[in-house]
Amino acid sequence: MLEGFKNYIGVFKNSSWRVKLSALIMGSGQIIYGRIAKGLIYLFMEIAFLFYMIARGFKDIKGFFTLGTQKADAWLGIAGDNSVVMLLMGIFAWIIVALFIGVYISNIKDAINIENTIISGKHPKAFIEELKELIDRKFYVTVLVLPVIGICVFNILPIIFMILISFTNYGGSTVPPELVDWVGLDNFKKILTLSKFAPTFIRILGWNILWAVVSTTLNYFAGIGLALLLNKDCVKGKAFFRAFPILAYAIPGFITLLAFKFMFSYGGPVNQMIRNAGGTPIGFLDLDAKWIARLIGLLVNCWISVPSIMLLATGHLSNRDMSLYEAARIDGATPFQQFKKLTLPFMLFATMPVLLGQFIGNFNNFGIFYFLRGGLYLDGYFLASDTDLLINWLYNLSIDNNYYCIGAAISLIIFIITSVISLAVYVNSPSFKEEDTFQ
Amino acid sequence: MMKKHSFGKAFDVAWTYALLIVVGFIFFFPCLWIVLASFSKSGSIYSFEGFFPTTYSIDTFKKLFTDTTMYNYPRWFFNTLFVAAGSCILGTFLTILTAYTMSRFEFRARKPMMKTTMVLGMFPSFMGMTAVYILMTQFGLINQIWGLILIYAAGAPMGYLTQKGFFDTIPKAIDEAAKIDGANSAQIFWKINLPLSKPIIVYTALTSFTWPWSDFILPKLLLKEKDLYTVAVGLMSLDETEFSRFAAGSVFIAVPIVIL
């Protein structure tokens, strides 16, 4: 990379004055060599860029660092600076600068190219020919423009924005027209030490990890168990029995969750049956229902995710090498031993990426407790309840209560946790290390 | 000895079936419950005797579509349909194109792009949404159904890997033959690969239709007016006394998905 760059500088030094001129005035080299249309486009880009920088660019980049200095004052009629817009325009200005540097480099490369072709006595491509390349050899450029722009605007830009927000004090009462400032790592320190956030964070994190581990294990083994059960030779009408989980799988998640919420609510059928049997109704999802609510969450999640794991496992189970089982049976292995020594390693190997995906999905499982027990704030927790996961807390903080910067910091922490776990699991997993064990 | 063996086998079969029936019941029961509840006459969950309503009628379904003063279900339904169809068309188009180029062309930015999408996938999806929410509020773009379609469609190419796998299986020899006959890349794509990839297009269209159809987080964030709600958000705003209306609405929204 660096070598290639040095190489280019050498080529540039040896090139004629025409190329060097186009380093100053973009496109001039191309125009001198007769590629007028292309040269004009480069020239136009440089003028547009300079115009943008003078009109707004420099101001926007400065605003990116200061995030506004003039507070709005309705009495004095001062419009004031909007820090969020300034931050966004600042990011935008950086992107423009980066793009321009790219165009600039391509301009010099192009000038050198044209020069070299002319020196070697060939005829450089005309502008029309280059345009034609866009639907042939360089078809990918034309096609990828739209998706890349879409992903940049709706995925990358928001993420960059949020990462930056986590280093500011944006949120709470500090929203425009108040001025927002850079605060460095303060938000992270606050989450880990301040009495307002720290206890809640530690408790929620603990429950979150417990939840992710338990629910993933439970779903995984229940799913494989169900698949094995359906796979037994003695079962007739497999399609019939398989239809029930698939039916459950097809229903949109939010409907299932709301239905279960109604089922366990005070007036719901479960409590009515308890009442009919002479008991007192139980608030399964109420304020003080810590472990009952957590258990219900686990089971409901199981109901939702087991069918998909079952479908996946069924596919993999049919790929097993049955002669191994035959051999194991002759050697006197019990069914449980067969499961432990043959089925499980094979399934773990085959489904590791899915298992990892399930774990991350459960770690960030927003829906379950949002629907079952959303909007509860308990004592001992700051804007959260004892079933909330980090992602629910994040929602409560940033959407419902405007703690944007803390929310952004939490999402960064979630990102770090999940990516570290994914990397660790992935690097240590047998499917990564010994690719050919089961081949 | 033989007898004991066959007894063990019968026992094995018996508990397998028992377990299967229990599992089937566990999965089937809530569905049955919702469907029956949607036909309940009184509508409130409190009037139920145990799990099931006492009297049945189809009034709830009629009410669902005619009584629109409080809960405008038909409106929600068409909003959802509009969003899902829009993002289905746009999203499928973008995803197929991305997957195709990623599978067929060798270019310098290819590997970095694939790695970037992997890293992007690790950020909590929520993070982007909060940012989108903040930006939309800042620029007054909340309550725009079009915005929703754009966001869904723009995010769709992120999941291009399945489709890329499909294109990888179409032999490249066909492309080369066409190239020798003088076709350019655009023609190869339109005239040769696109007709061959009908199954994967259908698959992509289905997934990118069902996702907005049943998503609730994004519409909940971005649509604040009752008339603009999608069904998911609308159904969430119903409470226990409107239980059978919820059930009827759910049945109606789940049916297309189940059929698919």
Image: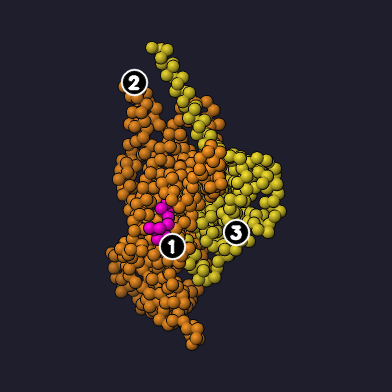
Residues flagged by tags 1 and 2 on a common chain: yes
Instruction: Output the letter for the chain in orange.
Output: A
Question: Magenta span has A114?
Answer: no
Splitting the image into 4 quarters, where does residue A382 fall?
bottom left
Q: Residues within 10 Å of mark 2 (few under 14, many from 20)?
A: few
Q: CA distance from mark 2 to mark 3?
A: 63 Å
Q: Which residues are magenta?
A: A378-388
Q: Is residue A73 visible?
A: yes
Element class at badge 3: loop
Discs 3, 1 touching: Cβ within 8 Å: no
Q: Is residue A244 left or right of residue A353?
A: right
Which residue position holds label 3? Answer: B229
Chain under callout 3: B
Query: Considering only vertical position in the picture, is B215 above or below A187?
Result: above
Residue type marked 1: Leu
Q: What residue sits 40% from the left and 81% below the top?
A: A69
Which residue position holds label 2? Answer: A330
Report the mark closest to the observer, 3 or 1: 1
Q: Residues within 10 Å of mark 1 (few under 14, many from 20)?
A: many
